[in-house]
Structures are given as C-alpha cells and as structure tokens.
Image (cartoon, helix red, strand yellow):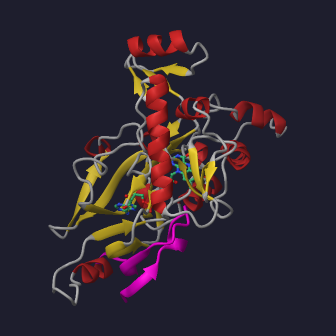
Amino acid sequence: MIQENISLKKYNTFGIDVTARYFSPFKTIDELNELLEFNQPSNNQSPSILVLGGGSNLLFTTNFDGLVLKNEIPGIEKVNEDDDYVYIKAGAGVNWHNLVMHCINHDWAGVENLSLIPGNTGASPMQNIGAYGVEIKDVFYELEAYHLEEKKIATFNLKDCEFGYRESVFKRKFKNQFVVTTVTYRLHKKPVFNTTYGAIEQELQAMGIHQLSIGAISQAVINIRRSKLPDPAVIGNAGSFFKNPEIGVEEFETVKNNFPNVIGYKLPNGNVKLAAGWLIEQCGWKGYRKNDAGCHAKQALVLVNYGNAKGEEIFELSREIINSVNEKFGVLLEREVNIV
Ligand SMILES: Cc1cc2nc3c(=O)[nH]c(=O)nc-3n(C[C@H](O)[C@H](O)[C@H](O)COP(=O)(O)OP(=O)(O)OC[C@H]3O[C@@H](n4cnc5c(N)ncnc54)[C@H](O)[C@@H]3O)c2cc1C
C-alpha cells in the first residue's frame, strides 16, 4: 500500500528528516509492477521514482516529491557450483552484512573483507562497494535488473556493469533506469586470504589468531571498522563522503614538492591515488562542527549529522571542503554519496 507524506528519517543513515510524497516497500517484481502503475491523483501522471535500499549512501537535501520504492526482495540461494566456486544469488533487499555472515557460515570465501558495510545487496553493484583490498567486482557473477520504462528484466554480467572505483554503469549511462532485483556472487570454495590491506594483519595478531580463516579475517575487519568509523545508529553518516582522488603522476609531483608528507598510492594505470581524508585533515576540517553538521573527529572523510542537521547544511559543508582542498592542493574532490 502506498503511504503519503512520510518521514524518511529512519530510512537514511544520515538521519535526515525529509518527507517522501509517496512511499512503498515491495518484495516481488509483481508488487513492483503494480506500484509502477500508480498515477498521482493530482495530475494522473506517474511520479518520479527513487529506489531505496538501506539508505546508507544517500544525502537527502530536500523533500522527495515522488514515489520512494523500498526494495525488500528477500532470499539467498545457491544456484550453481563447480569444482572451485559456488554461485550465490541474493534478493536485492537482503542486508549486505547478513549475506557476508551467511557466506562465512557456509565456508564460502571472497566477501569476508567486506564485512559490516551497511546497506543491501541490491546496492552493492551500484558503486562497486569496496573495502580492505576487495571490491564487489572481484566476486560478482551477474545481476538481474528491472527496466523501469520497458518493464522487463535484463541480465548484466561483469563486463556489462563497467565497474570502476566506486562506479558502475548504473551510476552513469543507466542512472535511474533500472531496479536491481537480484545479484549473483561467485565465491571460492577454497579461500584466497587477503590480509595485506590496512591493519588486518596487526588486528589478527592482536586477536591471537594463528590459524587464518575467513571468519577470523571478517572479525578483524569488523573490529577495525568499529574502532574507526562512527556507527550510524549513534551519529548519522553515510561512510566516506568523498572518493579518494586519482591524479596524474606530474600533478602528484607538484603536490609532493609543496607537501612532502602527502600520501599517494601508485595505480597500475600510472596515476596516483591520494587519500582524501588526509587532504581534508590538512585543511583543518577534522572535528569541525557547525550546528549539527560536522566532519568526524576521528575520520575526516566522514561527514556527520549530530542530530538535527539539514541535508542542505551537510551538502554546504561538503562544498566548502571541496573548495578548500582545491585551493590548497589544486585537487578536486568528488562526492561518493548520492545527493537527492
Ligand atoms: C558507516 C558506513 C560505512 C560504509 N563503508 C563503506 C565501505 O567500506 N565501502 C563502500 O563501498 N561503501 C561504504 N559505505 C556506503 C554504503 O554502505 C554502500 O554504498 C552501500 O552499498 C549502500 O547500500 P544501500 O542499500 O544503503 O543503498 P542506498 O543508500 O539505499 O542507495 C544508494 C544508491 O543506490 C540506488 N539503489 C539502491 N538500491 C537499488 C536497487 N536495488 N536498484 C537500483 N538502484 C538502487 C539508490 O537509488 C541510490 O542512488 C558505508 C556507509 C556507512 C554508513
């Protein structure tokens, strides 16, 4: 049933209190189809649509004057296997971390480094979620998505998704055209451990782990994330607000001449990836707060809502941060969070 003028505060991890003109969850494609038949009583036209998962990568800057469709398609199923892999198909409404735990409990390897990322499986390919040296593209097999105009399901394989760093075809040429309904992941039967990134090895040592397992890696990642990132249930946020910028090697040399401590990672394509958090911190934003909008005290990459911030205030803060980083370093930050 379609609800009217409801608050979206509990449906976005920033905790921004805006309203949706119309709102409805759906659990099946038939339900989705029915909802798409809905015309606004005022003008007999179909409203604009926003597909919502866990609301953990969104910043609402204004009330949404359309229909919010909350994707709650359930189900986790093993659909195939061969000597090396299992193929796990998940409904887009399945909570991502629950899927990770399900895989670990079944000894299916590949997603353990992605433990505790908020949100749902349906959004995992949208920005090719990644953490601790692993991205969705490393375990992705295919997805099914419903075309909003053509009203039919299309299947996308790895190549079709055009994954990049926090990017996919769904954020670019197919933006707002598809509703992801299921995602199939290809997971290893024999684990390939990936512990080189961040503080995983240190954390495993601190945990007293001698026999490596995907469960131990998952727990190490959970511990690190809990110590570093603000819990949205306590302080509203959407994780990293900005992407780590990629610049050319010459540009990097110029920055390095002026700021010898700059942190940069060489990429296979010859460019250099800078740590956006470091750049922001150098501009003095870490721990900054104006009214209820702020830049987190432990992690400058994360913008926060201390309670009653408006989306516009957080957006304005992000604009000021982008400008100051550009003035100081000549580097343009890009927002990772989707602005609505
Ligand atoms: C504390 C915290 C830590 C985080 N850490 C990480 C991290 O380590 N790595 C990382 O990559 N991200 C991270 N994120 C960001 C976020 O968790 C991911 O981007 C996640 O995939 C978003 O999922 P969601 O279901 O909440 O998407 P939503 O926020 O609901 O939606 C995000 C976008 O995808 C669209 N969308 C959602 N579902 C569908 C669907 N089924 N079909 C079509 N479009 C859809 C929405 O319209 C919107 O544009 C973090 C966020 C938080 C709050």
Expressed as whole percent of the image width and height from the top left, the position of residue 262 reads 57, 19
Residue at figure coordinates x 83%, y 36% from the top left:
206
Question: In this picture, is 70 found above or below 134?
Answer: below
Along the viewing direction, whichever of 254 and 137 lies nearer the viewer: 254
Please report the bounds of the magenta region as a residue range.
1-29
Q: In the rendered structure, does residue 18 fall within the stretch colored magenta?
A: yes
Q: In the rendered structure, does residue 140 fall within the stretch colored magenta?
A: no
With 147 as the anchor, is 14 left or right in this view? right
Tell me if I can see residue 110 in this picture.
yes
Quarter of the image that includes the N terminus: bottom left
Expressed as whole percent of the image width and height from the top left, the position of residue 132 reads 58, 37
Residue at figure coordinates x 40%, y 71% from the top left:
71
With 278 as the anchor, is 128 left or right in this view? left
Tell me if I can see residue 26 in this picture.
no
Quarter of the image that includes the C terminus: bottom left
Question: In this picture, is 112 found above or below 232?
Answer: above
With 301 as the anchor, is 6 left or right in this view? left
Question: In this picture, is 328 found above or below 230?
Answer: above
Along the viewing direction, whichever of 112 and 203 lies nearer the viewer: 203
Residue at figure coordinates x 46%, y 64% from the top left:
77
